[in-house]
Image (cartoon, grey):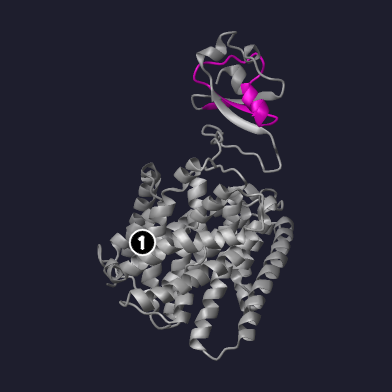
């Protein structure tokens, strides 16, 4: 149906609002937030409330923009110091692991659709294409689940999983494009395939590094009158990296992730506010992307492929992904079997495979719409089965660490830059803290801790030693480090 721009904005804002509200409460029931966004799109779609959205081109455009932002933001949030101990494991999983997952899954699909199930039949190349589309873990899903849960893991598993999910999309994308070309040009030579693959890999890596370094220098030297424009400048840099790399024949997704990784690990002006800008933008585009992909699918079309979808999905979860992980990590002896098992389980499918499934659809590959529906079905299965059990499995395998206490400030809107290692927290004054007197100097504080500000009612002021505190005051405390802050809590009885 044709709708006006005003009605479109009204419906869009309502869908976004319900996505935020439902997503906020989703984890109370152990449901991944992104899965709920997907379901909201399905409910609002053609088989639900009747919103007609059937353009894979528009969905792909939304997905490409969203994936750029997710990968770039994920790269900026990843610290070299965290991934350094596991960088080779992550690289192997993102390349060899993806290739093995795609190959094993593709061969299973070919056997299944030619020997067991005859409702759909794929050729070998079509089966391998489906395996390539499904081969990468979804960075949006992995980042959202690990970070929203605040899950701390042993054996450097969290940086490994985030590095893998953020860097394996380019490999899956390259394999997908190569298989589409092989289906459309059957006489393409193996050397041409290898050349295209290496070209995308090398140019993508180099472009991300070179443009990323140039971007850091530009941001630190340019003088913009409005501080908010620095975030817009970095967004422009991100789009340039993707567009320029794709234009010269490299892999734009790889370049964007590498560029974000390099930029995020350098100092640049207004870094804190820029990271917050991209964090909010990432969540916005994740919601929009999952809503759009949900609108694109018709649930009635999923029923005919449910059997294939369930069998292929379960095969990936319990066989192809674990086998690929175990083979890929076999040279590395510093990870336990439990760690490898957990790594194989967090092979979440999400929006990325669905976006990749639009490429053969747009290229008019035979049975592409069938592939899209199967990928969509497997994504739902993966998020429901794997996404809801990540935390429980980590606890069951004894791989989770105690949750670190968050020192988020509510009354004082201040933050340190990453280079400052001091710890900051706010404490509400209670009766026990005033038992030796009401003056600030009467309160027992460690040598390396200062009370730098007080909030009383709606008034903020800087205290002195003889400042009298009252019950209910909020005080801003700064310590040299986390250990000194813990000592402060102990002495104050907090």
Reply above or below: 340 against 430: below
**Position of residue 130 in the picture relative to residue 212 (left or right):** left
What residue is shown at x 69% (from left), y 63% (from top)?
212
Would you say residue 21 is visible in this rendering?
Answer: yes
Q: Quadrant of the image for the C terminus?
A: top right
Which x, y percent locates residue 91?
64, 61
What residue is shown at x 56% (from left), y 54% (from top)?
278
Q: Residues within 10 Å of mark 1 (few under 14, many from 20)?
A: few
What residue is shown at x 46% (from left), y 56% (from top)?
284
Task: Give 39 or 267, whichever is nearer the viewer.
Answer: 39
Task: Give 382 or 249, whichever is nearer the viewer.
Answer: 382
Would you say residue 224 is visible in this rendering?
Answer: no
Magenta-colored stretch includes residue 393: no
**Pointer 1 residue:** 9
**Position of residue 175 in the picture relative to residue 260 (left or right):** left
Magenta-colored stretch includes residue 471: yes
Which x, y percent locates residue 174?
57, 74
Reply above or below: 336 against 165: above
Q: Quadrant of residue 330?
A: bottom right
Magenta stretch: give its range: 459-488
Q: Secondary structure under badge 1?
A: helix
């Amino acid at each position: 149906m044709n709708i006006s721009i005003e009605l479109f904005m009204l419906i869009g804002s309502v869908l976004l609002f319900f996505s935020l509200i439902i997503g906020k409460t989703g984890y109370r029931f152990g449901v991944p937030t992104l899965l709920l966004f997907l379901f909201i799109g399905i409910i609002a779609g053609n088989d639900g409330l009747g919103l007609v959205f059937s353009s894979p081109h528009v969905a792909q455009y939304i997905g490409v923009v969203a994936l750029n932002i997710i990968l770039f933001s994920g790269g900026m949030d990843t610290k070299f110091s965290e991934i350094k101990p596991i960088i080779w494991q992550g690289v192997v999983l993102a390349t060899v692991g993806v290739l093995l997952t795609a190959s094993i899954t593709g061969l299973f699909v070919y056997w299944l659709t030619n020997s067991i199930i005859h409702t759909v039949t794929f050729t070998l190349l079509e089966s391998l294409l489906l395996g390539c589309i499904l081969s990468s873990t979804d960075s949006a899903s992995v980042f959202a689940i690990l970070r929203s849960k605040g899950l701390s893991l042993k054996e450097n598993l969290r940086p490994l999983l985030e590095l893998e999910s953020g860097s394996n999309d380019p490999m899956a994308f390259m394999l997908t494009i190569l298989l589409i070309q092989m289906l459309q040009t059957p006489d393409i030579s193996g050397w041409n395939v290898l050349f295209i693959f290496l070209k995308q890999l090398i140019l993508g890596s180099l472009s991300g590094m070179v443009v990323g370094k140039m971007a850091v220098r530009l941001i630190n030297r340019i003088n913009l009158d409005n501080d908010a424009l620095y975030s817009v400048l970095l967004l422009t840099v991100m789009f340039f990296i993707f567009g320029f790399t794709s234009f010269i024949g490299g892999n734009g997704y790889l370049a964007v992730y590498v560029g974000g990784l390099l930029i995020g690990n350098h100092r640049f002006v207004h870094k804190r506010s820029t990271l917050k800008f991209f964090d909010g933008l990432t969540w916005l585009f994740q919601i929009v992307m999952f809503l759009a992909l949900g609108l694109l699918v018709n649930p009635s079309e999923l029923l005919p492929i449910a059997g294939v979808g369930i069998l292929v999905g379960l095969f990936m979860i319990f066989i192809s992904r674990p086998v690929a992980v175990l083979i890929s990590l076999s040279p590395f002896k510093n990870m336990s079997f439990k760690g490898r098992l957990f790594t194989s389980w967090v092979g979440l499918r999400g929006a990325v495979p669905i976006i990749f499934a639009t490429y053969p659809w747009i290229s008019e590959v035979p049975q592409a719409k069938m592939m899209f529906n199967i990928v969509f079905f497997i994504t739902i299965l993966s998020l429901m089965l794997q996404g809801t059990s990540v935390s429980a499995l980590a606890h069951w395998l004894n791989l989770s660490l105690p949750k670190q206490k968050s020192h988020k400030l509510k009354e004082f809107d201040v933050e340190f830059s990453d280079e400052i290692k001091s710890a900051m927290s706010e404490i509400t004054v209670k009766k026990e803290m005033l038992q030796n007197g009401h003056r600030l100097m009467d309160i027992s504080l460690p040598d390396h801790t200062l009370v730098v500000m007080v909030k009383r009612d709606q008034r903020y002021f800087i205290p002195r030693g003889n400042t009298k505190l009252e019950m209910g005051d909020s005080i801003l405390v700064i310590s040299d480090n986390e250990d000194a802050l813990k000592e402060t809590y102990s002495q104050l009885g907090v």
